[in-house]
Amino acid sequence: METIQHPNLEVCVFNAAKEGNYESGDSYFTVVTDDYFICSVADGLGNGPIARESSQVIPQILKDGHHETIDGLMHRFNKLMYQKRGAAVAIFKVDFKKKTLEYSCVGNIRFYLYRKRTDQMIYPLPVMGYLSGRPQKLRTQTYTYEEDDLFLIHSDGVELRSPKSMMRMAGTPGRLYQNILTTVRTVDDATFISGSLLK
Ligand SMILES: [Mn+2]
């Protein structure tokens, strides 16, 4: 487990290749600064190195480009998919000052924001399909968050029957991580990131 401890958030990350594969076709990348947290998960189409070639576009761009807008970043990811297999990609940015969470997704990556105080769940809808290098419509949405909200993002190698009750029961990213871990099978590459927004 990789973890991030920061005054504004606490994050746990899981990433594994499917059984028999050396490399995961999923990639993820996180950036945390004094002002914001950016997190992206990508699931490359196909298998092994071919899948990884597409999903690795995400860390490549985010390393130096994380100050750019979410839509700008998604379009840059998309352009780099040209002549690759393509990937499902989700990205979100937590702005610690504005107390907002901006989310965009194309394809089969799931994201949940769970508000403990009101027992409410926010699940932004993705744009169907995947980033392929062709012109891409985006549906980027902005939410406000509250102290102690929990989030979860995962690729389709993780299947959860009831994410809301899991998040409610776990309460912390560490426990959510442990609980999800027991459900992960090795039939696909699997990535999940649990986190808590502390202030
Ligand atoms: Mn997958």
Image: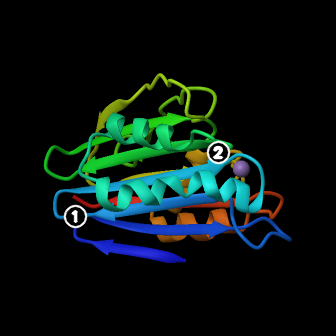
CB at disc 1 and ligand 1 closer than 8 Å: no
Amino acid marked by disc 2:
Lys
Nearest the viewer among 177 and 128 is 128
Nearest the viewer among 71 and 154 is 71
Whichever of labels 1 and 2 marks the residue nearer the N terminus, that label is 1
Q: Nearer the viewer, mark 1 or mark 2?
A: 2
Which residue is found at the position 71% from the left and 46% from the top? 45
Colouring scheme, one of rainbow, by chain, secondary structure, one colour:
rainbow
Residue that extends furthest to the front in the rendered view of this protein: 83
Q: Is residue 87 visible?
A: yes
Image quarter of residue 70? top left
Q: Is residue 112 visible?
A: no
Q: From this view, report whether residue 76 is shown above or below residue 10.
A: above
Which residue is found at the position 48% from the left and 53% from the top? 58
Looking at the picture, how far across and down is residue 19, in whole percent? 83, 69
How packed is label 2: few (under 14 Cα within 10 Å), some, or many (20 or more)? some
Quadrant containing the N terminus in the rendered view: bottom right
Pointer 1 residue: 33
Q: Is residue 117 left or right of residue 56?
A: left
In three-dimensional space, the C-alpha distance between marks 1 and 2, rounded to whole angstroms, equals: 31 Å
Q: Is residue 83 left or right of residue 3?
A: right
Tell me the element at label 1.
Answer: loop
Pointer 2 residue: 84
Looking at the picture, how far across and down is residue 83, in whole percent? 63, 41
How packed is label 1: few (under 14 Cα within 10 Å), some, or many (20 or more)? few
Looking at the picture, how far across and down is residue 76, in whole percent? 41, 41
Q: Is residue 181 left or right of residue 74?
A: right
Amino acid marked by disc 1:
Thr
Tell me the element at label 2.
Answer: loop
